[in-house]
Image (cartoon, rainbow, N blue to C red):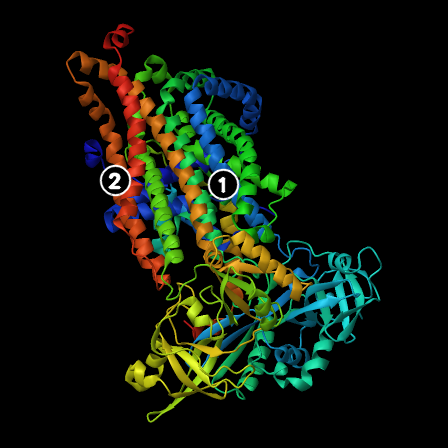
Amino acid sequence: MKGTNLGEFEELVLLTIAALISDAYSVAICDELEKYTGRAAKLGVVHAVLNRLEEKGLVKSRMGEATNARGGKRKRYYEVTHAGKVALTRSKEVREALWRIIPGFNLEGSV
Amino acid sequence: MKTTAQKPPEPPRWARNLLRWYCRLDLLEDLEGDMNEYFERNLKTKGIRHARWIFVLDALKFFRPYTIRKPKFLNLLIHWLMLGSYFKTSRRSLVRNKLFSAINIIGLAVSLSVGLLVIAFLTDLLSYDLFHEKRNRIYRLLTRTESADKSVMDLASTSLKAGFKIRETIAGIEDVSLIRRGFYSDAKVSDETIIPLEATWADPSFLKIFTFPLLKGNPATALKEPYSLVITEKTARKLFGETEALGKTVRFDTLNYRVTGVLKDLPKLSHMRFEALISLSSMLGQKADSDGGIMDWNNIYQNYVYLTLPENANLQAIQAGLDQLCAAENALLDRQKINLSLQPMDTIVLGGRLSNEIGVNIPLPVVWTLVGLALVVILSAGFNYTNLSIARSMRRSREVGIRKIVGALRGHVLGQFLAESVIISVMALFFSFLLFLFLRIQFLALAPPLAEVVLLELSPRLIFYFLLLAVVVGLAAGFLPALFFSRIQAVQVLKDASTLKVFRHVNLRKALIVIQYTFSLIFITATLIGYRQYRGFLSFDLGFTTENILNIRMQGNKSSLLKKELAEIPAIRQIATSSMITSLGSLYGTQMKYQDKGGKDSANVWQNFVDENYIPLHRHSFVAGANFKNRPTSGNETEVIVNEQVLKRFHMADQNPAEAIGKQVIVDNKPLTIVGILKDFHYGTMDHKIEPTVFRYSSDQPGGYLNVGIKSEDYPAALASIEAAWQKIDKVHPLKAVFYNEQLEEAYKQFEVMVKVIGFITFLAICIASMGLFGMVVFTTETRLKEISIRKVLGASEGGLIFHLSKGFLVLLFIATLIALPVTYLFFDQFILTKFVYHQPIGLSELLISVLVVMVLAFLLIGSQTLKAARSNPAKVLKSE
């Protein structure tokens, strides 16, 4: 059932790629994740997730232009595919559906 | 160096290469870029060291299944196809450079043979006790005894009581077997055959725990009944010849034993060895009444307990049970604590040092020393290979260039040169194997006990290890040269081979030479120091004379009988009796009590029972008093002669010898009067301090020795007449007579063995290092021949040229000397010689001689080659350009 379920971190990475639009490459994704979640995102972990997302067909990548930075190495930019968008929407819908059936008072005390 | 200083700091090159090596190509570029970006970022925030460290960690952490490059089978296939070509070119290059091939192959062969010997030795040690079916579940009970003055002793032996208690009280143990050593007696089969036999008492579980198969008899009952005897095949043949042994009776002393089993001969690699087993019940029945002490909790010196645990046994619970048992029993002991623990059987042979070891035990430091020595010699030969191959790389760089142009990848070239070095080392293995067969005989002959410990026999497993060693050595020696060749740029070498940076690795090569010579110097100095110490031990003034004294073991005969026979031999000067021979390492102690106005005091003293002739014969010198006056024929001793240390230990008579005469001491509950005080002498070996020692009187020592002073120079004749005299009193046992000086040599035999082994290794190390140096000198002078010719044409003198050529090498030797001498000196001064209370100082001569030997050798090598080069005709050399 590859591609149908999103892990929590996978979802976060996918959302970050979508948010960064055309500037989504691994280091930027790491920084963005750190900024929003407040937890340290290790390159190794993010890299592995990006690789998995691409295998699942949820993102696609292209190489950028070579510059003087990064020791002359090109960046790999990621972009959410149609399947990726579908997966994101679905997981959002699932969440919202669940949120809707939670009675309001259940959470009031703990917020 | 100037250019790199201005470059921006870079991530560690090796980590980047590692990443490039394993990472899939499609992932590599952006991954490396990411890591670079992080590196630059860390550089600013955390500093260079931290940034490099993180880079290395990342390079290692990215080694994951999804990043690894899949191996290319095509490349492997090419290697396989090219093997023939590699082989051919390797052979040609070997034949072309005869000198260098010889240096490499001889060096590797010699050093590998040492490696083979060590491997065979280790394999044997690790194969001990493998024949026991339950070997993984067999444990031995160890004892640690701690006395009131905090001296601790670890023993392999234990008490019988511990064994019985464990069997009764501790759960979770499958079988417990109790053994006791120390049965020596003459086995009388018939009136004609009386054979001395050494046996071990064992209980019925013994045959259950250990896999010693019975050829005849029932293993369940063979050791059950009292006076049962189980003998090995060999013993059976000795006792009964070819006739059936089972069921026969053997008489020991006054008791009849029945043979209830015949064991298959013991495998040689068994840590436990015996000729015969006697049922433990026979001993318990016999001695229980006469000597109640045998079942005491602190009777821990002669008994051994082995046990088997079930699979997945709970060792902690068993240890807790042992601790509980010890606590309960120790409460009843006076000023002594005994603790028990379990030792797995596979750590018995290659384990720590324990007192009262039952059989074979090789201390780990000995093994590590051997492995270390072999490793150093092999490394040294490997260094030669690395050095010479890189140095001569110019000759083969064209070949590599062409290979690369035809299509070889870096990996292929790497493979080719690794294959070549492996081929050479396997060739060397062949020669080293022949050497090994020879060395094996020499090694076993080094010390007779060694032949008892190891077999060093060939087996398929051993041959496999040998091959493995050769391949590993080949790979290790060839790695750096192969790496060097694989980096060669094809275009560059084909255009102009001289642009190749042969001298780029000069520092590496220099370092290797320095290491080789440092080790050579350390070895030779160690040998000289060791030899000097060994000679020192033998010629040491023990405080008494050992010249021309023959010690005869009485083997149970009455001394007076033999004395009477020997008295008629004219060559014999004097005859004395003693219970033991001192200064050889064996100790015999007892408690001595002394009561003074200050109070009571008791201490351990070493003792020897002697007669009135002993002290004059050995020329011990009296500080005060004189020899024994009261000379009772049996027991009833009243006098004792002590050494100066006794006065010191007991603060007797303010250490005034003259006043101490006549004082009373109590030894073994007997009041004895001090009649003489001897100057301190060595009772123990050189590693022991002189301690309080006493001589007690006894005119007859059937279990001891007769010390015979011989005056004639004709030793064979004297020995022959002693032999004849011995024959008259004892027909069963052969005469055991050894000169005191020979016994001393035997006692320090281990040092002789050590000096021989290290001396041999030294010889090899120096030979290998010299060959390597020779190779390098030949190479350097060859490549610099033109330079030399030009210098000569411009007017350089021969002496000046020799100095110019050899300068570099001499500096290296000088550095090696500066490292080696202090290291050796400190090592011996701080670690080795401190273990010997009485030792020779390290002389300057040992240090200087070793330097001299190595330097003279090196001068000869360097000098001969540089002289040759300096004398060459410059016209001839320069013409050929």
| Residue lying at 26% horizontally and 20% vertically, measured from the top left | B867
For label 1, the SS is helix
Locate residue B395 relative to residue B407 in the image: left or right: left
Give x and y (percent) for residue B9.
25, 40
Give x and y (percent) for residue B266.
70, 57
Location of the C terminus of chain B by quadrant is top left
Which mark identifies residue B114?
A: 1
Camera-side residue of B340 and B613: B613
| Residue lying at 50% horizontally and 41% vertically, measured from the top left | B115
Q: Are marks 1 and 2 in contact (CB under 8 Å)?
A: no
Camera-side residue of B652 and B420: B652
Amino acid type, label 1: Val
**Chain under numbered label 2:** B
Is residue B180 visible in this depiction of the protein?
Answer: yes
**Chain under numbered label 1:** B
Which mark identifies residue B815?
A: 2
Which mark identifies residue A81?
A: none
For label 2, the SS is helix
- Mark nearest the camera among 1 and 2 is 1
The verdict on a common chain for dots 1 and 2 is: yes
Where residue B640 sits, quadrant-wise, is bottom left
Camera-side residue of B452 and B310: B452
Locate residue B401 relative to residue B226 in the image: left or right: left
The numbered mark, 1 or 2, whose residue comes first in the sequence reads: 1
